[in-house]
Amino acid sequence: MIFTASRLSGVIFIMENSTEDYRIQSFDLDTQALLKTALKDPGSVNLEKVSNIIVDQSLKDQIFSKEAGRICYTIVQAEVKQSNGNVFRRNLLNRLQQEFKDREETRRRSLQEWVCYVTFICNIFDYLKVNNMPMVALVHPVYDCLMRLAQPDALMNEEEVDCMVMQLHRIGEQLEKVNAQRMDELFFLLRDGFLLQERITSMSRLLLLEILEFRAGGWMLSSTAHKYYYSEIAD
Protein backbone atom coordinates (compact mmCIF):
# COMPACT_ATOMS: atom_id res chain seq x y z
CA MET A 1 0.00 0.00 0.00
CA ILE A 2 1.53 3.29 -1.14
CA PHE A 3 0.43 6.55 0.48
CA THR A 4 0.80 9.07 -2.34
CA ALA A 5 0.87 12.81 -1.68
CA SER A 6 -0.87 14.76 -4.43
CA ARG A 7 -0.71 18.52 -4.97
CA LEU A 8 -2.52 20.57 -2.36
CA SER A 9 -4.16 23.20 -4.55
CA GLY A 10 -7.57 21.65 -3.89
CA VAL A 11 -7.24 20.96 -0.17
CA ILE A 12 -10.27 21.88 1.87
CA PHE A 13 -10.05 22.01 5.66
CA ILE A 14 -13.05 21.11 7.73
CA MET A 15 -12.29 23.35 10.69
CA GLU A 16 -11.16 26.92 11.10
CA ASN A 17 -7.58 27.65 12.03
CA SER A 18 -7.22 28.11 15.75
CA THR A 19 -4.53 28.92 18.23
CA GLU A 20 -6.39 27.19 21.05
CA ASP A 21 -4.99 24.43 23.18
CA TYR A 22 -3.48 21.68 21.01
CA ARG A 23 -2.55 19.50 24.02
CA ILE A 24 1.19 20.10 23.59
CA GLN A 25 1.91 20.76 27.26
CA SER A 26 3.26 17.23 27.66
CA PHE A 27 6.24 18.11 25.48
CA ASP A 28 9.42 19.72 26.75
CA LEU A 29 9.67 23.50 26.29
CA ASP A 30 11.89 23.34 23.21
CA THR A 31 9.49 20.95 21.46
CA GLN A 32 6.51 23.08 22.45
CA ALA A 33 8.23 26.08 20.90
CA LEU A 34 8.97 24.11 17.71
CA LEU A 35 5.35 22.98 17.36
CA LYS A 36 3.98 26.47 18.03
CA THR A 37 6.27 27.85 15.31
CA ALA A 38 5.22 25.11 12.89
CA LEU A 39 1.57 26.03 13.43
CA LYS A 40 2.19 29.64 12.42
CA ASP A 41 5.35 29.68 10.29
CA PRO A 42 5.96 26.16 8.95
CA GLY A 43 8.53 27.28 6.41
CA SER A 44 10.96 28.23 9.17
CA VAL A 45 11.19 24.78 10.79
CA ASN A 46 12.19 21.22 9.88
CA LEU A 47 8.80 19.76 8.96
CA GLU A 48 10.07 16.18 8.78
CA LYS A 49 11.15 16.52 12.40
CA VAL A 50 7.79 18.04 13.30
CA SER A 51 5.85 15.20 11.66
CA ASN A 52 7.96 12.59 13.45
CA ILE A 53 7.40 14.31 16.80
CA ILE A 54 3.64 14.31 16.27
CA VAL A 55 3.52 10.67 15.17
CA ASP A 56 5.83 9.49 17.96
CA GLN A 57 3.71 11.19 20.60
CA SER A 58 0.49 9.88 19.05
CA LEU A 59 1.75 6.30 19.28
CA LYS A 60 2.29 6.52 23.03
CA ASP A 61 -0.42 8.94 24.17
CA GLN A 62 -3.99 7.99 23.31
CA ILE A 63 -5.37 11.37 24.37
CA PHE A 64 -2.93 13.13 22.06
CA SER A 65 -3.65 10.70 19.21
CA LYS A 66 -7.28 11.84 19.30
CA GLU A 67 -6.26 15.50 19.01
CA ALA A 68 -3.25 15.28 16.68
CA GLY A 69 -5.35 15.68 13.55
CA ARG A 70 -6.11 19.26 14.59
CA ILE A 71 -2.41 20.05 14.77
CA CYS A 72 -1.73 18.39 11.43
CA TYR A 73 -4.48 20.13 9.49
CA THR A 74 -3.41 23.49 10.92
CA ILE A 75 0.21 22.96 9.87
CA VAL A 76 -0.87 21.77 6.41
CA GLN A 77 -3.15 24.80 6.06
CA ALA A 78 -0.42 27.17 7.17
CA GLU A 79 2.08 25.64 4.73
CA VAL A 80 -0.37 25.92 1.81
CA LYS A 81 -1.09 29.56 2.60
CA GLN A 82 2.60 30.34 3.03
CA SER A 83 4.11 28.59 0.01
CA ASN A 84 1.50 26.24 -1.53
CA GLY A 85 3.79 23.48 -0.27
CA ASN A 86 3.11 19.96 0.88
CA VAL A 87 6.34 19.06 2.71
CA PHE A 88 4.63 18.38 6.02
CA ARG A 89 1.82 16.30 4.53
CA ARG A 90 4.27 14.27 2.43
CA ASN A 91 6.40 13.48 5.48
CA LEU A 92 3.31 12.70 7.54
CA LEU A 93 2.03 10.23 4.92
CA ASN A 94 5.46 8.62 4.60
CA ARG A 95 5.59 8.04 8.35
CA LEU A 96 2.03 6.72 8.44
CA GLN A 97 2.93 4.31 5.64
CA GLN A 98 5.97 3.09 7.55
CA GLU A 99 3.92 2.47 10.67
CA PHE A 100 1.19 0.81 8.60
CA LYS A 101 3.66 -1.71 7.20
CA ASP A 102 4.76 -2.56 10.76
CA ARG A 103 1.25 -2.74 12.22
CA GLU A 104 1.27 -6.47 13.08
CA GLU A 105 4.62 -6.17 14.81
CA THR A 106 3.33 -3.11 16.65
CA ARG A 107 0.23 -4.99 17.80
CA ARG A 108 2.33 -7.90 19.09
CA ARG A 109 4.71 -5.56 20.89
CA SER A 110 2.23 -3.12 22.40
CA LEU A 111 -1.54 -3.23 22.18
CA GLN A 112 -1.69 0.35 23.44
CA GLU A 113 0.61 1.58 20.67
CA TRP A 114 -1.46 -0.30 18.08
CA VAL A 115 -4.71 1.24 19.33
CA CYS A 116 -3.05 4.66 19.33
CA TYR A 117 -1.95 4.18 15.72
CA VAL A 118 -5.46 3.25 14.59
CA THR A 119 -6.88 6.26 16.46
CA PHE A 120 -4.28 8.55 14.89
CA ILE A 121 -4.68 7.42 11.27
CA CYS A 122 -8.47 7.65 11.59
CA ASN A 123 -8.06 11.13 13.08
CA ILE A 124 -5.95 12.21 10.11
CA PHE A 125 -8.50 10.69 7.71
CA ASP A 126 -11.23 12.69 9.45
CA TYR A 127 -9.46 16.06 9.41
CA LEU A 128 -7.57 16.30 6.12
CA LYS A 129 -9.61 16.53 2.93
CA VAL A 130 -8.72 16.99 -0.74
CA ASN A 131 -11.38 18.74 -2.82
CA ASN A 132 -13.69 18.28 0.15
CA MET A 133 -13.29 14.50 -0.06
CA PRO A 134 -11.37 12.05 2.14
CA MET A 135 -7.78 11.42 1.11
CA VAL A 136 -7.88 8.43 -1.25
CA ALA A 137 -4.42 7.34 -0.07
CA LEU A 138 -5.81 6.66 3.42
CA VAL A 139 -9.07 4.85 2.58
CA HIS A 140 -7.73 1.30 2.24
CA PRO A 141 -5.16 1.57 5.07
CA VAL A 142 -7.91 2.79 7.42
CA TYR A 143 -10.17 -0.05 6.31
CA ASP A 144 -7.34 -2.55 6.74
CA CYS A 145 -6.79 -1.36 10.32
CA LEU A 146 -10.50 -1.62 11.13
CA MET A 147 -10.70 -5.06 9.51
CA ARG A 148 -7.84 -6.17 11.75
CA LEU A 149 -9.78 -4.96 14.79
CA ALA A 150 -12.73 -7.07 13.63
CA GLN A 151 -10.77 -10.36 13.59
CA PRO A 152 -11.70 -12.98 16.21
CA ASP A 153 -8.56 -12.51 18.33
CA ALA A 154 -9.06 -8.73 18.46
CA LEU A 155 -12.75 -9.03 19.33
CA MET A 156 -11.72 -10.83 22.51
CA ASN A 157 -9.94 -7.65 23.64
CA GLU A 158 -12.21 -4.89 24.93
CA GLU A 159 -9.62 -2.20 24.21
CA GLU A 160 -9.57 -3.08 20.51
CA VAL A 161 -13.35 -3.38 20.28
CA ASP A 162 -13.76 -0.01 21.99
CA CYS A 163 -11.25 1.57 19.61
CA MET A 164 -13.00 0.16 16.55
CA VAL A 165 -16.44 1.31 17.68
CA MET A 166 -15.13 4.80 18.47
CA GLN A 167 -13.56 5.13 15.02
CA LEU A 168 -16.70 3.89 13.26
CA HIS A 169 -18.76 6.45 15.15
CA ARG A 170 -16.36 9.12 13.99
CA ILE A 171 -15.63 8.20 10.36
CA GLY A 172 -17.86 5.23 9.47
CA GLU A 173 -20.30 7.22 7.37
CA GLN A 174 -17.44 8.92 5.47
CA LEU A 175 -15.76 5.57 4.82
CA GLU A 176 -18.95 3.97 3.57
CA LYS A 177 -19.49 6.78 1.06
CA VAL A 178 -16.08 6.17 -0.55
CA ASN A 179 -16.18 2.36 -0.41
CA ALA A 180 -19.44 0.71 0.61
CA GLN A 181 -18.28 -2.79 -0.34
CA ARG A 182 -15.50 -2.81 2.23
CA MET A 183 -17.87 -1.46 4.86
CA ASP A 184 -20.22 -4.36 4.11
CA GLU A 185 -17.29 -6.79 4.51
CA LEU A 186 -16.33 -5.18 7.82
CA PHE A 187 -19.85 -5.44 9.18
CA PHE A 188 -20.15 -9.07 8.09
CA LEU A 189 -17.18 -9.74 10.38
CA LEU A 190 -18.73 -7.73 13.22
CA ARG A 191 -22.09 -9.46 12.87
CA ASP A 192 -20.46 -12.89 12.84
CA GLY A 193 -18.33 -11.96 15.82
CA PHE A 194 -21.41 -10.84 17.73
CA LEU A 195 -23.45 -13.93 16.84
CA LEU A 196 -20.87 -16.71 16.77
CA GLN A 197 -18.01 -15.83 19.05
CA GLU A 198 -18.50 -17.06 22.58
CA ARG A 199 -15.36 -15.73 24.26
CA ILE A 200 -15.98 -12.00 23.95
CA THR A 201 -16.90 -10.01 27.06
CA SER A 202 -20.38 -8.74 27.79
CA MET A 203 -19.15 -5.15 27.28
CA SER A 204 -17.64 -5.98 23.89
CA ARG A 205 -20.87 -7.72 22.89
CA LEU A 206 -22.86 -4.63 23.90
CA LEU A 207 -20.51 -2.37 21.92
CA LEU A 208 -20.82 -4.59 18.85
CA LEU A 209 -24.61 -4.64 19.07
CA GLU A 210 -24.63 -0.85 19.39
CA ILE A 211 -22.45 -0.26 16.32
CA LEU A 212 -24.50 -2.78 14.29
CA GLU A 213 -27.65 -0.87 15.16
CA PHE A 214 -25.90 2.47 14.64
CA ARG A 215 -25.06 1.65 11.01
CA ALA A 216 -28.44 -0.01 10.37
CA GLY A 217 -30.06 3.26 11.48
CA GLY A 218 -28.17 5.29 8.88
CA TRP A 219 -25.22 6.04 11.19
CA MET A 220 -27.41 7.28 14.00
CA LEU A 221 -29.28 5.89 16.97
CA SER A 222 -32.84 6.61 17.99
CA SER A 223 -33.14 8.46 21.29
CA THR A 224 -34.52 5.30 22.89
CA ALA A 225 -31.60 3.18 21.66
CA HIS A 226 -29.13 5.84 22.74
CA LYS A 227 -30.55 5.87 26.27
CA TYR A 228 -30.49 2.07 26.40
CA TYR A 229 -26.91 1.59 25.24
CA TYR A 230 -25.34 4.41 27.15
CA SER A 231 -27.17 3.66 30.38
CA GLU A 232 -25.89 0.07 30.04
CA ILE A 233 -22.35 1.27 29.39
CA ALA A 234 -22.50 3.67 32.33
CA ASP A 235 -23.67 0.84 34.58
Image: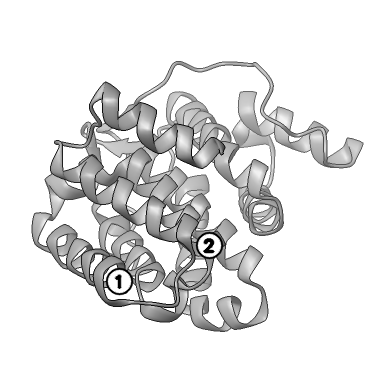
Rendering coords of residue 116 (x, y %): 58, 57
Rendering coords of residue 105 (x, y %): 57, 83
Rendering coords of residue 127 (x, y %): 40, 36
Give the total number of marks visible in the rendering: 2
Q: Nearest the camera: 17 or 48?
A: 17
Q: Please tell me which of labels 2 and 1 falls first in the chain.
A: 2
Q: CA distance from mark 2 to mark 1?
A: 13 Å
Question: Looking at numbered disc 1 in the image, what kind of residue is underneath it?
Answer: Gly
Q: Residue at x 32, y 42 (%)?
A: 171
Q: Residue at x 34, y 77 (%)?
A: 197
Left or right relative to 66: residue 33: right
Q: Nearest the camera: 144 or 88?
A: 144
Left or right relative to 229: residue 27: right
- Residue neighbourhood size for the residue with mark 2, other residues' Cα within 10 Å, grouped as few (<14), some (14–19), many (≥20): some
SS category of the residue bearing label 2: helix
Question: Looking at numbered disc 2 in the image, what kind of residue is underneath it?
Answer: Glu
Residue 193: which disc? 1
Rendering coords of residue 218 (x, y %): 14, 36
- Residue neighbourhood size for the residue with mark 1, other residues' Cα within 10 Å, grouped as few (<14), some (14–19), many (≥20): many
Q: Nearest the camera: 194 or 54?
A: 194
